[in-house]
Image (cartoon, grey):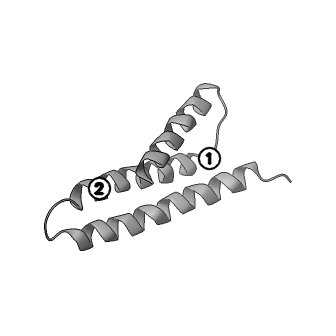
Amino acid sequence: MLYLLTVHILVGGWVLSTHLQAPTLHYVFALLGWFGYMAANGIGRRAGKENVALGITILSSIFVLLAFAIGQWAVKPF
């Protein structure tokens, strides 16, 4: 999941470079989710921190879902 999200963020950076835009909250939640997954990956390797990593992963998943929902709303035809 972490690598797939990293590729997705890189594709998003490429899309931004072509001057296509989405709402700012879409980018904020996507990056917060990515940073959270990265942090959870590092924290989960420490002994006794599994529950903290799980909590961060759940919160990061919520952020990614919010970013997805905002992105879908932005491209919804009227």
* Amino acid on which disc 1 is placed: Pro
Most distant residue in the bottom direction? 51
Mark 2 to mark 1 CA distance (whole Å)? 28 Å
Q: Quadrant of the C terminus?
A: bottom right
Residue 69 located left or right of residue 45: right
Q: Quadrant of the N terminus?
A: bottom left
Disc 2 or 1, which lies upstream in sequence? 1
The image quarter in which residue 19 lies = top right
Residue 69 in the image: state x and y as whole percent: 63, 60
User: In the drawing, what numbered circle is on residue 23?
Assistant: 1
Report the residue at 15% width, 61% height from top: 46
**Which element carries disc 1, helix, strand or loop?**
loop
Residue 13 located left or right of residue 22: left
Residue 5 in the image: state x and y as whole percent: 48, 48
Residue 43 located left or right of residue 16: left
User: In the drawing, what numbered circle is on residue 67?
Assistant: none
User: In the drawing, what numbered circle is on residue 41?
Assistant: 2
* Amino acid on which disc 2 is placed: Asn
The image quarter in which residue 55 lies = bottom left
Question: Nearest the camera: 33 or 5?
Answer: 5
Most distant residue in the top direction? 18
- Using the image, determine if residue 21 lies above or below residue 69: above
Report the residue at 48% width, 60% height from top: 63
Most distant residue in the left direction? 47
